[in-house]
Image (cartoon, rainbow, N blue to C red):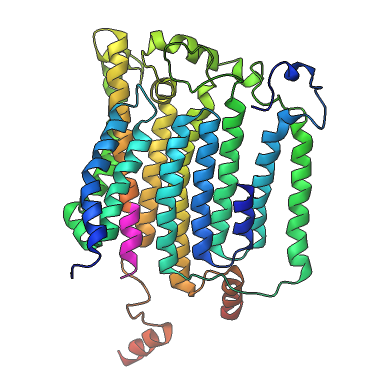
Amino acid sequence: MAVTAISIVRMKNLFAVVMMGGIYSLLSALIFVNLDAVDVAFTEASVGAGISTVLMLGTLALTSREEKQEKKSSHKIWLPLAVCIATGAALVYGTLDMPLYGDPNAPIHQHVAPRYLTESIDEVGMPNVVTSVLASYRGFDTLGETTVVFTAVVGVLILLTGRRRREKHEPTLEELEEQEDEV
Amino acid sequence: MFLQDGGAKTVQYLDFLSPGLYNYWIVIFLMMVGFYIVISRGNLVKKLVGLNIFQTSVFVLYISMGKVEGGTAPIFGEGFNTFSNPLPHVLILTAIVVGIATTALGLSLVVRIREEYGTIEEEDIHAQEDESL
Amino acid sequence: MIQRKPILRVTSKVFMPFILLYALYVQFHGDFGPGGGFQAGVIFGSSFILYALIFGLHDAKLVLPSAVLEILSALGVLVYAGTGVVSFFMGSNFLNYNALAHDALHGQHYGILLVELGVGITVFSSMTLIFYVFAGRGR
């Protein structure tokens, strides 16, 4: 997965970048299966590797395929890298206080989750806890997310439907003034 | 996965070599790769790919925190008693779909920018803006 | 349109009903196995995207016009919120499904089914609509 990410950084051909993005999504779906999150893996495989790759390709068809080759001055390469390494080091320092991987006594497992796991079969009656939490316990949350998806679609429609402005002839300011003079 | 048969108990809390924190380090590495793409590349489509990498790393962080040693997927069945935490799964499940919707919005912005400016490179756009001023 | 790529056309024709069926299975079996509205919507949408990719956008729009999709994407959110409002009027809290049927467990079952249906409809029509718009922009 890390190798794929690095190769995305290096590549200039955007078509290949998008393809590597699909592979990256699929790999992360495999990791999710490994981490016992089958629902999430399912979604990631269908969304990340399927739809998002298609959409990116659609964008590339409308724009250009190659990233511009540019000669970069050295500070343009090293400054972002230094920023990233500094941020990463700070975050690694932060993880030293985090609970260990797979620790059943971690704080995340203490508060709400036990109730979902022990009582949802009596309260909701669904074998799949993820579904019952998604639709029942956190129904408001999911309603909001659905609305976000809907709003995003409305935004895309506003931006991309309608006539192209370049194609119709727009009268410039001078032409308008000329017309006024004629009148 | 890393910690089996009693080794977990002996691992010191602040031991730098402890394998129990690898998942966070992988997440941080991926996150920084995405961050680097976003801040160092001028191509708008590539910036969006970088944002996607960043996003996926956050997903992996959440899911790996929800993992319980010896647990299975949170679907009730015969003979399973320990389950991984379902809460992060729910959050990330919705976040993925919302993420693709917002990515589509970003891509449509890129397409509009391309139609207006004829390029998707940040520097060229800045150059055109300077010329028009 | 000239008949090109016969292999692609025949295989996609064979696969289409199975993808749709699988999406419906994921949609309504989400209570018992992995799945649910979000995934089912994406799979359902991807089958139409496949159709549009192979048979052309024009044919896909004959099967499923984008005006229908626009209505559907709003309808999904309405179904979701409407379930909440119905439970509201049947004497319970907003989005608390216990009151939807005679006993609480059945009420929860119906509520989750309806809500997941709303999510599925919205996600499906959104994904397909986004693809239509992107593909239709080029020409």
Q: How many marks?
A: 0
Against C11, residue B126 (above or below) is: below
Nearest the camera: B43 or A157? B43
C81 sits to left or right of A57: left
Indicate yes or no whether the magenta region holds residue C105: no
Where in the figure is residue B49, as x and y percent of width and height? Answer: 54, 55
Where, quadrant-wise, is the C terminus of chain C in this rendering?
A: bottom left
Hey, which quadrant is residue A105 in on the image?
Answer: top right
Residue A100, can we see it? yes
Where, quadrant-wise, is the N terminus of chain C in this rendering?
A: bottom left
C54 sits to left or right of A68: left
Where in the figure is residue A154, as x and y percent of width and height? Answer: 36, 50
Where in the figure is residue C107, as x and y percent of width and height? Answer: 28, 14
Nearest the camera: A102 or C102? A102
Indicate yes or no whether the magenta region holds residue C136: yes
Hey, which quadrant is residue C38 in on the image?
Answer: top left
Against B42, residue C112 (above or below) is: above
Q: Residue at x 36, y 13 (%)?
A: A125
Q: Residue at x 21, y 55 (%)?
A: C10
- What residue range appears in magenta? C130-139
Hey, which quadrant is residue B37 in on the image?
Answer: bottom right
Q: Residue at x 35, y 21 (%)?
A: C32
Where in the figure is residue C131, as x and y percent of width and height? Answer: 34, 55
